Image: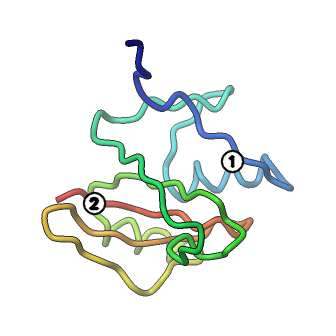
Protein backbone atom coordinates (compact mmCIF):
# COMPACT_ATOMS: atom_id res chain seq x y z
CA UNK A 1 0.00 0.00 0.00
CA UNK A 2 1.25 3.49 -0.83
CA UNK A 3 1.44 5.91 2.09
CA UNK A 4 2.19 9.57 2.59
CA UNK A 5 5.74 10.57 3.52
CA UNK A 6 4.95 13.58 5.67
CA UNK A 7 3.19 16.90 5.64
CA UNK A 8 4.00 18.76 2.44
CA UNK A 9 2.37 22.06 3.31
CA UNK A 10 -0.01 23.95 5.53
CA UNK A 11 -2.24 26.48 3.77
CA UNK A 12 -4.50 29.04 5.39
CA UNK A 13 -6.75 31.88 4.35
CA UNK A 14 -5.70 35.34 5.49
CA UNK A 15 -7.14 38.81 5.05
CA UNK A 16 -3.53 40.11 4.84
CA UNK A 17 -1.35 37.21 3.63
CA UNK A 18 1.89 39.21 3.66
CA UNK A 19 1.39 40.38 7.25
CA UNK A 20 0.44 36.91 8.48
CA UNK A 21 3.42 35.33 6.70
CA UNK A 22 5.65 38.00 8.23
CA UNK A 23 4.30 37.25 11.70
CA UNK A 24 5.08 33.53 11.37
CA UNK A 25 8.56 34.39 10.08
CA UNK A 26 9.35 37.13 12.62
CA UNK A 27 7.67 35.74 15.74
CA UNK A 28 8.07 31.99 15.30
CA UNK A 29 11.28 32.02 13.27
CA UNK A 30 10.04 30.14 10.20
CA UNK A 31 12.85 30.49 7.68
CA UNK A 32 10.63 30.74 4.60
CA UNK A 33 11.91 31.11 1.06
CA UNK A 34 10.13 33.15 -1.64
CA UNK A 35 7.62 30.31 -2.18
CA UNK A 36 6.91 29.78 1.52
CA UNK A 37 9.03 26.62 1.63
CA UNK A 38 10.66 25.86 4.95
CA UNK A 39 12.84 22.86 5.78
CA UNK A 40 11.99 21.75 9.28
CA UNK A 41 14.04 19.64 11.65
CA UNK A 42 13.26 15.93 11.76
CA UNK A 43 10.98 14.84 14.56
CA UNK A 44 7.57 13.46 15.40
CA UNK A 45 4.34 14.78 13.95
CA UNK A 46 1.00 14.04 15.62
CA UNK A 47 -2.17 13.54 13.59
CA UNK A 48 -5.23 13.42 15.84
CA UNK A 49 -8.96 14.02 15.47
CA UNK A 50 -10.80 15.82 18.28
CA UNK A 51 -14.52 15.80 19.09
CA UNK A 52 -16.49 18.39 17.12
CA UNK A 53 -17.38 20.29 20.30
CA UNK A 54 -13.81 20.57 21.67
CA UNK A 55 -12.74 23.90 23.12
CA UNK A 56 -9.06 22.90 22.86
CA UNK A 57 -8.62 24.92 19.65
CA UNK A 58 -9.92 28.12 21.23
CA UNK A 59 -12.66 29.53 19.02
CA UNK A 60 -15.44 27.13 18.07
CA UNK A 61 -15.07 28.36 14.47
CA UNK A 62 -11.46 27.15 14.26
CA UNK A 63 -11.63 23.72 12.62
CA UNK A 64 -7.95 22.75 12.93
CA UNK A 65 -4.94 23.76 14.99
CA UNK A 66 -1.32 23.91 13.89
CA UNK A 67 1.22 22.56 16.36
CA UNK A 68 4.91 23.51 16.19
CA UNK A 69 7.68 21.62 17.98
CA UNK A 70 10.04 23.89 19.95
CA UNK A 71 13.33 23.26 21.75
CA UNK A 72 12.62 25.51 24.76
CA UNK A 73 8.96 26.35 25.43
CA UNK A 74 9.69 28.97 28.09
CA UNK A 75 12.16 30.83 25.85
CA UNK A 76 9.74 30.73 22.89
CA UNK A 77 6.84 32.05 24.98
CA UNK A 78 9.04 34.84 26.39
CA UNK A 79 10.15 35.76 22.86
CA UNK A 80 6.55 35.89 21.67
CA UNK A 81 5.50 38.06 24.62
CA UNK A 82 8.39 40.43 23.95
CA UNK A 83 7.17 40.81 20.36
CA UNK A 84 3.66 41.64 21.61
CA UNK A 85 2.03 38.36 20.56
CA UNK A 86 -1.18 37.12 22.20
CA UNK A 87 0.26 34.33 24.38
CA UNK A 88 -1.90 32.23 26.71
CA UNK A 89 -0.80 32.46 30.34
CA UNK A 90 -1.28 28.75 31.04
CA UNK A 91 0.98 25.93 29.95
CA UNK A 92 0.31 22.23 30.22
CA UNK A 93 2.53 19.23 30.82
CA UNK A 94 1.73 15.65 29.83
CA UNK A 95 4.01 13.08 31.40
CA UNK A 96 6.05 11.28 28.77
CA UNK A 97 4.73 13.58 26.00
CA UNK A 98 6.05 17.03 26.86
CA UNK A 99 4.99 20.59 27.60
CA UNK A 100 2.52 22.76 25.69
CA UNK A 101 1.80 26.45 25.36
CA UNK A 102 -0.38 28.50 23.01
CA UNK A 103 -0.22 31.69 20.99
CA UNK A 104 -2.82 33.29 18.74
CA UNK A 105 -1.73 34.63 15.36
CA UNK A 106 -2.74 38.14 14.19
CA UNK A 107 -5.92 36.81 12.56
CA UNK A 108 -7.14 34.88 15.60
CA UNK A 109 -5.89 31.34 14.91
CA UNK A 110 -4.75 29.51 18.05
CA UNK A 111 -1.41 27.73 17.58
CA UNK A 112 0.02 25.12 19.89
CA UNK A 113 3.71 25.03 20.79
CA UNK A 114 5.11 21.67 21.94
CA UNK A 115 8.37 20.95 23.72
CA UNK A 116 8.60 17.15 23.41
CA UNK A 117 9.61 15.17 26.49
Q: CA distance from mark 1 to mark 2?
A: 23 Å
Q: Is residue 51 above or below residue 13?
A: below
| The quarter of the displayed image where residue 79 is located | bottom left
Label 2 environment density (alpha carbons within 10 Å; few <14, some 14–19, many ≥20) = some
- Lateral position of residue 16 relative to residue 61, left or right: right
Asked if labels 2 and 1 touch by Cβ distance under 8 angstroms, the answer is no
Q: Assign the N terminus to one quadrant of the image.
A: top left
Q: Residue furthest top?
A: 1
Q: Secondary structure at mark 1?
A: helix
Q: Position of residue 66 (x, y in %)?
A: 52, 54
Residue bearing the label numbered 2: 115
Label 1 environment density (alpha carbons within 10 Å; few <14, some 14–19, many ≥20) = some
Q: Position of residue 9 (x, y in %)?
A: 58, 33
Residue bearing the label numbered 1: 21
- How many marks on residues? 2
Q: Is residue 59 above or below residue 38?
A: below
Q: Residue at x 59, y 76 (%)?
A: 58
Q: Secondary structure at mark 2?
A: strand
Q: Nearer the viewer, residue 104 or 52?
A: 52
| The quarter of the displayed image where residue 72 is located | bottom left
Instruction: Say whether disc 1 or disc 2 marks the residue closer to the N-terminus.
Output: 1
Amino acid sequence: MEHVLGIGGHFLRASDPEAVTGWYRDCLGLDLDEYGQWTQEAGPTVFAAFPADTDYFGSATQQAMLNFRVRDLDAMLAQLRQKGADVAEETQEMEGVGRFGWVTDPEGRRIELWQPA
